[in-house]
Image: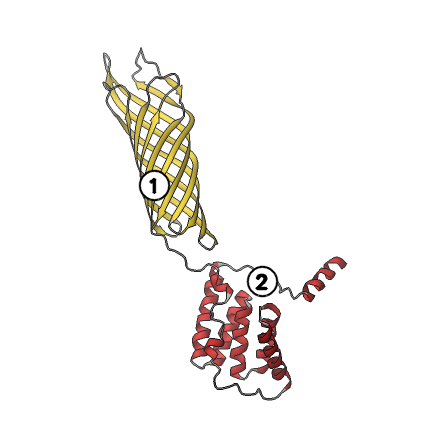
Amino acid sequence: MRQVLVLVGLLGLLGVAPLARAQTEDEVTEARRFFSEGVSAYQAGDYADAARDFEQAYELTRDPDVAFNAARAYERAGEREEAARYYRIYLRDGHAAVAERAQLERLVTVLETEEQTPPRAETDDDAVALRTSPSFTARFAPRFEEMVRVSALFTMGLGGGLRFSADPDILLVPDGRSDLEPTFGAAVRGELFVARYLGIGGELGLASYSVEDAEDRELTVDIDLWLRPRLPFVLSGALELELYVGIPIGFTLYRPSDPDLENLLGFNFGALGGVSFAPHENVAVFVEVGWRHRQVYDEVTIFDTHDVTLKTDQAHLALGVSLRL
């Protein structure tokens, strides 16, 4: 306990300002409203209303520049005690230059000891004297509002297998599962953000498959609806991080390597977890990890008509780059 008291005392001697509590986005939005109304009221000469607005903004943000504005408005409204209190808050927590600090300390002394404040010079411009860009206004500041995203990505499937089944059974081709070699592919994706936390779009993807010990590779084409529930975070400046879940669902065309076999049609779906990092407001890079399922059908005639089904399940990895518009 003694060490804590000593540390607090040292911080006080060094002039370290108390730590302001973290504000939520809603609180900062409300503080901006009070601050804007305070500036407007002050410029219109409604100093009492301006002081109350600045005080509300300060209670939400603990920003010393807002305290300065409250002090200036209370001074103009004739509220000497409140003006002195908020000037002292600014002097304690703000970053006043040496000359400004000396001037404000003299003013606080006058406000606290004399009955009447000396009139200011006619050349004083109170609107300019206000702090119009306090530090809190940078938090959750309106940023680049993304509407459309176009992405190109490299995809890889790992592990998993291809399952074959026929109804009725084909004697010479028994039902069973074959392990898959790594699958390589690419895709393009377009999205429209209908809300801050949801993107909807489409994806066209190609992938090359091969089962173990096979000489040729098969080709699949996916045409998907793409859903992106997301949670974006502003880091600093233009940096932005986004966590999201990708949900592809759509149609699949399976192209056998044997030219005598017909294409198989079916569907696909998946679930992917993604992280997107935007070092610039118009460009982002991302990685996705998850699972993809594909299932296609056909009919073949070997002495009889057989309904054939092919299913693949694989872990999915994607790396890509996005253009944000």
Location of mark 1 (residue): 226
Residue situated in front as seen by the camera: 164 or 236: 236
Mark 2 or mark 1, which has the lower sequence index? 2
SS of the residue under disc 2: loop
Residue 235's place in the image compared with 245, above or below, is: below
Callout 1: 10 Å neighbours few (<14), some, many (20+)?
many
Label drawn at residue 287 = none
Residue situated in front as seen by the camera: 31 or 88: 88
State whether residue 75 appears in this view.
yes
Badge 2 amino acid: Ala
Residue 181's place in the image compared with 228, above or below, is: above
Identify the image quadrant of the N terminus. Answer: bottom right
Residue drawn at x 75%, y 58% is: 3
Residue 288 horizontal side relative to residue 103, left or right: left
State whether residue 1 appears in this view.
no
Badge 1 amino acid: Trp
Residue drawn at x 71%, y 63% is: 10
